[in-house]
Image (cartoon, rainbow, N blue to C red):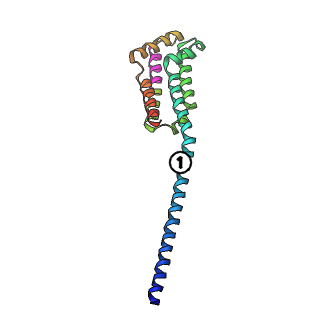
Amino acid sequence: MELNSLLAVVISVLIVTIGTYLCINALVKSQADRKLWDRKIAHAQLITPLRLQAYERMCLFLERITPNNLILRVAPSASTAPELHQILLREIREEFNHNLSQQVYIGIDTWEIVRNAKEEVISTINLASQEVSKEATANELARQIMKRVIESGNPAVSTALEVLKKEIQVLF
């Protein structure tokens, strides 16, 4: 009889110990999961506004380097075609360098599309510059650039804006 009662006590202690272990283990896991969730929420609260700002800045960058906007903004400060050419290229590079850090917050493919749009605008300006004489006025170069833009429709900038908008819609 004593063996049976000793065995019952041992089994009872073992059951209580295992139950206690399982409860403590579940509690610790629950707290770890909660801490992880809290960190994810805090991270999202910090990163989401930064990502949103990056998309906004990239859209603004693309709008600012669109040839018609660019020409309207800088043409009055140039009198000759070569001078306008240099000012336009400098403005694009400065805008790009100012927004370079935003690539951290947008997708790799989207960043590449934005870079390609910038390069297409530069190419359009360079080609138009080659089509006018060195003695041409800034207005003549501006007209030639706009002619090229109208002919091409500036698809890279439009495509980049579209991709940015789609990516941000997926994000939010």
Residue tagged 1? 40
Which quadrant of the figure has residue 53? top right
Point out residue 49 in the picture as x, y percentages from the top left corner: 56, 36
- Percent coordinates x, y for residue 7 in the rendering: 45, 84
Q: Residue at x 52, y 38 (%)?
A: 105
Q: Magenta region: which residues?
A: 120-131
Of residues 172 and 104, the one nearer the viewer is: 172
Three-letter residue code for mark 1:
Lys
- Quadrant of the image occupied by residue 83: top right
At 45% from the left edge and 29% from the top edge, which residue is drawn? 165
Please, which residue is most extreme toward the left here? 151
In this view, 77 is above or below 4:
above
Residue 37 x %, y %: 52, 50
Residue 127 is covered by the magenta coloring:
yes
Residue lying farthest to the right in this orientation: 77
Tell me the crowding category of disc 1: few under 14, some 14 to 19, or many 20 or more residues within 10 angstroms, Cα based.
Answer: few
Residue 25 versus residue 164: which sits nearer the camera? Answer: 25
Quadrant holding the N terminus: bottom left
Q: Secondary structure at mark 1?
A: helix
Q: Main secondary structure of the magenta part?
A: helix
Residue lying at 44% horizontally and 35% vertically, measured from the top left:
170
